[in-house]
Structure formats: C-alpha cells, structure tokens
Amino acid sequence: MKYVIVICSMFLVIMLALGATAQTAKNPHYSRTDIERLNVTNSEWKKILQPGVYHIAREEGTERAFTGEYHDNHKKGTYYCYVCGNALFSSDTKFDSGTGWPSFYQSLKASSVKLKTDQSAGMSRTEVECARCGSHLGHVFNDGPKPTGQRFCMNSAVLDFEEKK
C-alpha cells in the first residue's frame, strides 16, 4: 500500500512539474503549442469538461461577479483557454475594472480570440470566443483604459493561468 501511495505521489508531482492539471490530463485537445482550429462537438466537450466549465464555455454562461479565481490575481504570467490551451492574454494587459471579472485591455494576439455579435439578454454586446476551440470566454466593451479603450471582461472558469517564472 505504501508503494502505491509513493508511486501516485510521484506521478502527481511529475504532472504538476510539467504544468498539467487534472483537466488537461483528461483533455486530449488541450495544447499550449498547437494553434490548429479544433472541430469538437458539444457532446464530446460535455464528456471532457467539468459541468461549470461546460456551461460557461459551450452554453455561453457567466460566473457570478467576484467569485472567479482570477478577478483579483496580480501575479505576472499568461492566461490560456482552460478548454484547449490557446494563449489568450498577458498579465501585462490586465487591469482592475471593478466589475468582479478578470479584465484585459487587449488579447495576447489579435488571432487569439474571435469576436462576434451577441444579441442575448435583451442587449447588443460583443462576445469573445477562443479562436482555437470556439469556447465562450466573456465579452468585450469599449470602456477600457488606454491604449486600446477596450475591456475584455472574461470568466475565470474558462481561463488557465501560468505564472511567469
């Protein structure tokens, strides 16, 4: 029994050292290096993703303000798509918008995200999707700081943060 615990512990340490999480270990589509567009059905994503993540990413849900892991994160690093690993935002563009969601004034690259019109909830907004997997990330508004004037208001549950070493 002791050997099983030791082996499992070693495996966990190795996975953490490699930057893997429980999510990425069971998600065959997660890659921080692959930029090829994914074509995965929602039924497949439902098998892979945790229910809360699935609701936000694939059903365009929203987490409650001030409840997400990253709304008050001040560490330096990179934010990736939790669903597929696509690089999305740098902490260098993160700012405190006071809204309760992690906010950025620009994406890491223009090709990191895809913008589309969202007419839901009785208003017209611009939805932000991951350009690689099409997952809903949040919305972008034109009330952000300079230099862009934009506020990318994201859901923490669909972000994966890697601290800069």
Image (cartoon, rainbow, N blue to C red):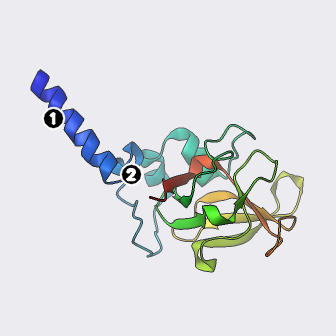
Query: Residue drawn 42% across and 65% down?
Result: 32
Query: Residue drawn 59% across and 53% down?
Result: 57
The quadrant of the picture occupied by the N terminus is top left
Cα–Cα span, label 2 and label 1: 20 Å
Q: Secondary structure at mark 1?
A: helix
Crowdedness near tag 1: few (<14), some (14–19) or many (≥20) residues, C-alpha within 10 Å? few
Residue 35 position (above or below residue 83):
below
Residue 136 position (above or below residue 39):
above
Q: Given contact means CB atoms under 8 Å apart, are the residues at marks 2 and 1 in contact?
A: no
Crowdedness near tag 2: few (<14), some (14–19) or many (≥20) residues, C-alpha within 10 Å? some
Mark nearest the camera among 2 and 1 is 1
Q: How many marks?
A: 2
Answer with left or right where residue 71 lies relative to residue 77. Answer: right
Residue 13 in view here:
yes
Disc 1 residue type? Ile
Dot 2 or dot 1: first in sequence order is 1
Q: Which residue is mark 2?
A: 24
x, y percentage for residue 87? 52, 67
The quadrant of the picture occupied by the C terminus is bottom left
Query: Residue drawn 46% across and 68% down?
Result: 39
x, y percentage for residue 6? 16, 30
Q: Which residue is mark 1?
A: 7
Answer with left or right where residue 24 lies relative to residue 91. Answer: left
Residue 135 position (above or below residue 101):
below
Query: Residue drawn 74% across and 67% down?
Result: 105
Answer with left or right where residue 162 lies relative to residue 64. Answer: left
Disc 2 residue type? Thr
What residue occupies the far bottom of the structure in this picture?
A: 110
x, y percentage for residue 73? 63, 47
Residue 82 in view here:
no
